[in-house]
Image (tube, rainbow, N blue to C red):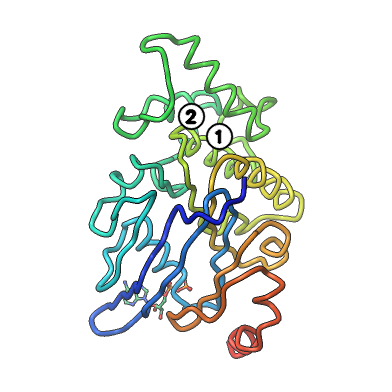
Amino acid sequence: MVSTQPILSATGLTMEFRGFVAVKDVTLSVNEGTIHALIGPNGAGKTTVFNLLTKFLTPTRGQIHFRGNDITRLKPAEVARLGLVRSFQISAVFPHLTVLDNVRVALQRPKGLATQFWLPSGSLSGLDERAMELIDAVNLSSYAHLTAAELSYGRKRALEIATTLALDPAMLLLDEPMAGMGHEDIGRIADLIRRVAKNRTILMVEHNLNVVADLCDRVTVLARGEILSDGTYATVSADPRVREAYMGT
Ligand code: ADP
């Protein structure tokens, strides 16, 4: 469901590293149920904004609100508990465990991080059922008994997404989910993101503009730490300032 209600909003975010302003006065909002992309040339500040939103960095100035809570000063685990989770953040994939065991482990993470789904305590069959649901959701059912090390790169990332989904986050932040992938894996992960987004909000940093055009409801363009443009892909890609920023690098 796409709404015009912001689930996450940042106001006047500024991040200085010993006097160097990496992110300057960034105000952005992500609407509930949308797939939102953060794009921009190298050095634009995308990673810094991501780290600010997930609380790996605390802004020099500005505020961040998630679902009505001021999260500006919270820690990553605290925002994860509120339902804002970065993929690959908490979800280490263990190469020598099977796909099923990886998801089982993810489902049994510290209770504080897994408050949003119901699991009958001590019931292994309940756990396995939930694990298989998640494995199915990322199309890995046929690979459930392979070790993570045996999976292709794209399927490994799908497994990482499954372990993140074990937290049942309301909002997922994906850092370059297509990085290093071939055409087939890109298609598979794009389908997966679309499916996952049906009842969640997604914010992703992505370099592949075809993927952004195809997948994202809204796009925010950063350059030199500032927001250059914000809107649909069609709008921002027609913006001369955006063209200039991309061509200037
Ligand atoms: P992007 O992800 O868009 O490539 P980054 O957020 O990684 O951009 O970086 C934005 C700018 O901030 C770059 O000039 C980078 O060198 C600088 N920067 C990022 N992190 C640090 C840091 N910890 N200390 C100093 N400068 C940093």
Kindly identify which numbered label has been placed on residue 85.
none
- Quadrant for the C terminus, please: bottom right
Is disc 2 in contact with disc 1, using a CB cutoff of under 8 Å? Answer: yes
Mark 1 closeness class: few <14, some 14–19, many ≥20 residues within 10 Å: many
Which amino acid is tagged 2?
Asn
Towards the viewer: 167 or 150:
167
- Residue at image position (47%, 70%) is 46
Q: Position of residue 35 (x, y in %)?
A: 60, 54
Q: Give the residue number, with chain letter if any, for mark 2.
A: 102
Q: Give the residue number, with chain letter if any, for mark 1.
A: 148
Q: Is mark 2 within 8 Å of ligand 1?
A: no
Horizontal placement of 194 versus 65: left or right?
right
Q: Position of residue 228 (x, y in %)?
A: 53, 81
Q: Position of residue 232 (x, y in %)?
A: 66, 68
Towards the viewer: 68 or 195:
68
Horizontal placement of 154 versus 172: left or right?
right
Which amino acid is tagged 1?
Ala
Ligand 1 picture quarter: bottom left
Residue 105 sits above or below residue 199 on the image? above
Q: Earlier in the sequence, mark 2 or mark 1?
A: 2
Considering every residue shown, the one lying at the far front of the view is 4
Q: Residue 118 falls in which quadrant of the image?
A: top left
- Residue at image position (34%, 74%) is 12
Q: Secondary structure at mark 1?
A: helix
Residue 134 sits above or below residue 158 on the image? above
Q: Residue 58 falls in which quadrant of the image?
A: bottom left
